[in-house]
Image: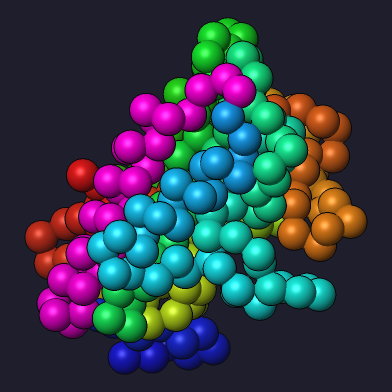
Amino acid sequence: MFFKNIKIELKTAREIEKMRVAGRVVAEILERLSEIIKPNITTKDIDIFVEKSIRSVKMIPAFLGIKGISYPFPASACVAVNEEVVHGIPNASRVLKDGDIVSVDIGVLYEGYYGDGAKTYAVGKVSDTASKLLKVTEMSLEKGTKQALAGNRLGDISYAVQETVEKEGFSVVRDFVGHGIGRALHEDPQIPNYGKVKTGIKLLSGMVLAIEPMVNVGSHEVVMLEDNWTVVTKDGSLSAHFEHTVAITEHGYEILTKV
């Protein structure tokens, strides 16, 4: 089924089941990463772990080779450290240290359907500000997800994220958004992390959304580095990123990227 101006394909129960399988793999890998992310490992170590984990269950790393501005993404995981917001390229020389925060965004392809999720981790002992940032960002994802109900509007999700973040003194990134997901990794609709209640398209059963707050300690402004992938905060402040793939059903919402 398609909507005016944007193309939104509602998923069948069978399609959602395939995405549930993909999402479960994403969730399990993100959970296992909490055991290996520690000081002195490299961001490339994280990428190697992610790719091996995906291929061990005969699935395909969704990000590896995805088209970019000037060249395909060269890794299976986006790994962003501290002021890096999203799309960080894993590097064998980038060593994590005590006090860092690191977000890991991964996607898998299973029988033609995608799962996508992200989590930001504390490396060792982090500052109170960093700890609060992680809690607030994850909370904003939870609040936004609870608005993913048939009959609600897309703006209800966006507003819930923004309100949660801004009342704690942080800012939501505006230049990058969540998205629909299914047979393509990025589908309509785009899902901003800011907005107004009761605005935007109506949410319907069968939609599957990748909801992903990106939250900065300082300004919402971001810039892209010369590698044409890595996005960082313009003011150098810390940034966190959490993401779930969420299906809207007749019975409510279902988080597909949850163990």
Read off the magenta span. 12-40
In the image, 199 versus 116, the foreground residue is 116
Residue 48 placement (x, y as % from top left):
51, 50
The residue sitting at 82% across, 31% down in the picture is 236
Q: How was this image coloured?
A: rainbow
Asked if 21 appears above or below 136 in the picture, the reply is below
Residue 127 sits in quarter: top right
Q: Position of residue 117 (x, y in %)?
A: 41, 52
Image coordinates for residue 90, horizontal then vertical, percent: 65, 48
54 horizontally vs 196: left or right:
left
Q: Residue visible at 85% across and 32% down?
A: 235
Report the quarter where the N terminus lies: bottom left
What residue appears at the point 36 percent right and 64 percent down from the top-left corner? 55
- From the viewer's perspective, tell me whether residue 38 is left or right of residue 83: left
* Left or right, 108 with reference to 17: right
Figure check: 123 above or below 161: above
Quarter of image, res 111: bottom left
Confirm whether the magenta stretch covers residue 39: yes
Is residue 249 visible in this depiction of the protein? yes
What quarter of the picture does the C terminus occupy? top left
